[in-house]
Structures are given as structure tokens and as C-alpha cells.
Amino acid sequence: MSSILTCKNLSKSFGSKKALDNISFNIERGRIVGLLGPNGSGKSTFIKLCNDLLTPTSGELQIAGNVPGVETKKIVSYLPERTYLNDWMKVSEIIQMFKDFYQDFNSEKAYDMLKRLDINPSERLKTLSKGTKEKVQLILVMSREAQLYLLDEPIGGVDPAARDYILDTIISNYQENATVIISTHLISDVEKILDDIIFLKNGQVVLQKTVDDIREENGKSVDALFREVFKC
Amino acid sequence: MSWDLKSDRPIYSQLIEQIELKICSGIFAPGTKLPSVRELAQDAAVNPNTMQRALSKLEEDGLLYTNRTSGRFVTEDVKMIQQAKHRLAQEQISEFLEKMKSLGFDKSETLSIVSEMLKGAKK
């Protein structure tokens, strides 16, 4: 299987601070990957590099053979850590905007998910709660038929029931050879749906393995291992 | 359908056990068609790749078989299901015996407690 994402000796510094320090790995197609690490370990920096929001200080990063840019944005669906949508817009207007923007956007799917989460499409974004806004944003991202989904903290702000629904949405909506990268520190919630995990610590990769290998070798969950590796 | 997954053991081996259990207890009856990988994965709230891996193993073991065009089925070989049932029972019992041992009961003591309780249960 070919890799959807490769990075080689990738580094990103902000002044003298190294946010990512010489990381190298491949991510295959058709996987759900957890990018896990404590606050400040470089998760968001990595995801921003993948979306061309930051440029590498050194090293290489390729998505489906291209460096992040116009070509990769066509195939990458990105959920940023913060919302960037215009507050005054109605949910339905935002859906229209996404449809105009992205060729692979499936508005039928979006309306379907809105209905299941009981969100009224004719409401304006500013009238929605923080959690509901996050749901809307995730719905937009998952309604694209992309090859790579980059989800930065997708479940941080929502209640446990909605969390389950969101994870369910992730499992049931990604295409068979699409890859999903989820950055989070809510490990116990996501570990059942992950194939692989990447542990980041101080900008370096300390572990890349499958969830079942970790459980087999360590006799404990990824969550428990995380607590051990990153013990404060 | 309920799935009970523990967090300290590989997910795929637990899926195998639970599907075996569902086959043995008749929730998935001999010869019936299984739901799709995606449906099963969604139901158990696990990754579809992991579910696929578990189903492939069960297929290798012979409890499931794939009909190329129409999906995945439970074996019609009742004898094989009986064997699986027997194996599961043995696993349960050895686990139980292990626990009794750690409580300090030897084999004959354990046996007498069990037979006593079975007598009680009959009444």
C-alpha cells in the first residue's frame, strides 16, 4: 500500500524553540491514526504544517506525493483546533459555501448528520453553543469525500454522548482507503477506533505502533501507557 | 447486541472471543449471514480494520465462511460450533480454577464447594 503522508527529518522551530525536532514517519492509506501527546508536544504544529499554514524549517513533508499546497488541499479535509467560520452565517449558508469551495463536498451527507444531531440548519452560528458549533464544524469536515482527514482535537468540547456519535461518524463516513489522523489527549475515548498511534513528546516521535500491539506487548491500554510515558 | 471490551487486552482478540460467544450462544445461528464489517464495527464502536482482522481469523479457524458474492456466513458445521463451545467452557473453567487456587482452595475442596452449590441450585 502506498503512503498517504510521509515526513522525513521534519523540523519546525519558532525562534529558538523547536516545536518539531527531526521527525520521520509514514502513514498508510486506509488507517485511523491517533496523534497523541501532552500539551505543547507539537501535535498542532504538525497538523498545521500538513495544511500549509506553517512552512517547515527543514526536512520534507509530502501528502500523496505533493508538498502541502493547492493540490493537497483538494484531498485533505481539515478540522482546525479553533473555529474560523463566520458567526453571522446560517448553518445552511455555510454548507452552501463548502459546496462551492470543495468539489468533494456531499451536502446530502451534511444535512443527514445535522438532522441526527438535532441541529437546525436555518440557525445562525452565533446562536449555537460552543459544543454545537464544534459539531457543525466536524460535520462539514466529514462531509467531504477526502483522502486524508486531519482532525485537531475533534472531541474536546462536546459531551460524552455526542463524542460517541462523532466517533461513530468518523468510523462510518471515511472511505475505505482514506486515512484519518486524529490529534487528541482524550485517549481512552478514541483508542478503540484507532489502528495506529504516534506518541509525540517535546517535538519528537517516541512511539509509533498499532493499538493492538501496544496492548499485547504491555498488557495495558494506550491510555495507561500514555500516563506512564508522560508522567509528570 | 452488546460488546464488552476491556481496555488492557488487544481489541481484535476480544472481538474474536465475543463473536465466538455470539455464535455459540446462537445469537449468530449456524448458516446465517453476518452483518457487514462496517455495521459490526459501528455496533462495537471499533475500527473497521480491526473488525476485519477478527473476522478473517475466525474465517481461518472455520467458524465463518465467505461466499464471494453474497457476504459472510456462520458455518453450518454444528460439530465445529460444539467444539468451539467446549473450548470456551474449558477456558472459563480453568480461569475459575486459577482464581480458586489463589484463594487457597485445592482441587478437591473446590470440587466439593461446586457440587454443594449445584445441589443447592437444583432445589
Image (cartoon, helix red, strand yellow):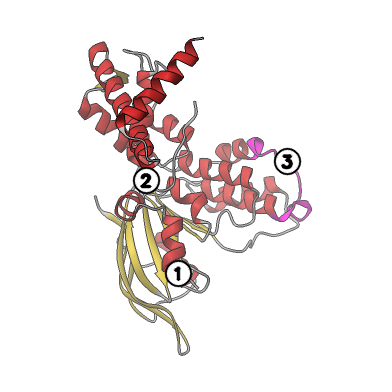
Element marked by disc 3: loop
The amino acid type found where label 2 is placed reads Arg
Q: Chain of mark 3?
A: A
The magenta stretch is A114-130
Residue drawn at x 30%, y 31% as measured from the top left: B107
Residue A101, horizontal then vertical, whole percent: 55, 53
Q: Label 1: which residue?
A: A230
Element marked by disc 2: loop
Residue drawn at x 25%, y 33% as measured from the top left: B57
Pointer 3 and pointer 1 on the same chain = yes
- Magenta stretch contains residue A125: yes
Q: Chain of mark 1?
A: A
Q: Label 3: which residue?
A: A120
Image depth: mark 3 or mark 2 in front = 2
Which quadrant of the view contains residue A112?
Answer: top right
Residue A88, horizontal then vertical, whole percent: 76, 57
Q: Label 2: which residue?
A: B9
The amino acid type found where label 3 is placed reads Asn
Crowding near the residue tagged with mark 1, few <14, some 14–19, many ≥20 C-alpha atoms within 10 Å: few
Residue A85, horizontal then vertical, whole percent: 66, 59
- Magenta stretch contains residue A124: yes
Q: CA distance from mark 3 to mark 1?
A: 41 Å
Image depth: mark 3 or mark 1 in front = 1
Determine if residue A69 is in view: no
The amino acid type found where label 1 is placed reads Phe
Is A206 placed above or below B97 here? below
Q: Is residue A86 left or right of residue B26?
A: right
Of the image marks 3 and 1, the number of the one nearer the N terminus: 3
Pointer 3 and pointer 2 on the same chain = no
Crowding near the residue tagged with mark 2, few <14, some 14–19, many ≥20 C-alpha atoms within 10 Å: many
Pointer 2 and pointer 1 on the same chain = no
Element marked by disc 1: loop
